[in-house]
Image (cartoon, rainbow, N blue to C red):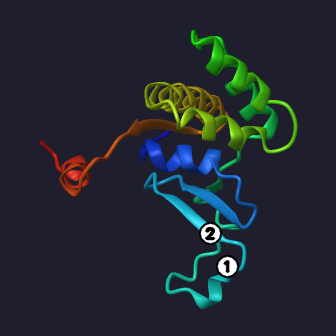
Amino acid sequence: MNRIKVESQDIIEAFESNNPGITYFLNRESGEVIKVAEDFCPDETISGIDYFSDPQFIRIPKISNREGLRIREDYLTRIKNEDLYDKLEQTLLGRGALKRFVDILRIYPTYYKDWTDFKNQAIIKIIKAWIEELDIELDLVTFTSLEDIIGQDRDV
């Protein structure tokens, strides 16, 4: 079984992406998350790699709107401010609910930070469930600087 290190924010972004023109892949050897545009043509790139057919690259699934809504509903149980709770609950009705939910939380910096942490942990659980289906062991790491990235490659 292959064990790889993956930058947590990169894979969270891939799962969370709602851009239909972008597909994300996980390099099963290096742990790199690769963003590929809809108009990608391997013949026109320097690498010439066809991420869609090369078994070294695994297509990363996107979280469904239903799952995104469930995460938001779960987060609502943490809200003690009744006014904010009511506003957030209202945003979950109708089209554009997922974006409106976050837009309201941005007005409340403490709750927005809490929401971001909560959402990331929920997505990490989804990632871990997905990765269990593959023959890969995954270490999620957070790089905050170039020194962190370089330090990860050194044998100490």
* Residue at figure coordinates x 62%, y 69% from the top left: 36
Question: Farthest residue in the front direction?
Answer: 83
Which picture quadrant has residue 73? top right
Question: Farthest residue in the right direction?
Answer: 94
Question: Farthest residue in the bottom direction?
Answer: 44
For this rendering, which residue is in front, 68 or 146? 68
For this rendering, which residue is in front, 61 or 117? 117
**Relative to residue 100, is residue 128 drawn left or right?**
left
Residue 155, numbered circle? none
Residue 75 visible to an observer of this rendering: no
What kind of residue is marked 2?
A: Val
For this rendering, which residue is in front, 90 or 33? 90
What kind of residue is marked 1?
A: Phe
Instruction: Give the vertical position of 22 relative to 132 (above or below).
Output: below
Count of all numbered marks drawn on residues in the image: 2
Q: Secondary structure at mark 2?
A: strand
For this rendering, which residue is in front, 95 or 122? 95
Q: Which residue is mark 2?
A: 36
Instruction: Give the vertical position of 104 relative to 89 (above or below).
Output: below
Q: Residues within 10 Å of mark 1 (few under 14, many from 20)?
A: some
Image coords of residue 6 (percent x, y) = 43, 46
Image coords of residue 18 (percent x, y) = 71, 53
Q: Which residue is mark 1?
A: 40
Instruction: Look at the numbered discs 2 and 1 and tell me whether their residues touch, using CB distance below 8 Å.
Output: yes
Image coords of residue 7 (percent x, y) = 41, 46
Question: Farthest residue in the left direction?
Answer: 156
**Relative to residue 146, is residue 77 drawn left or right?**
right
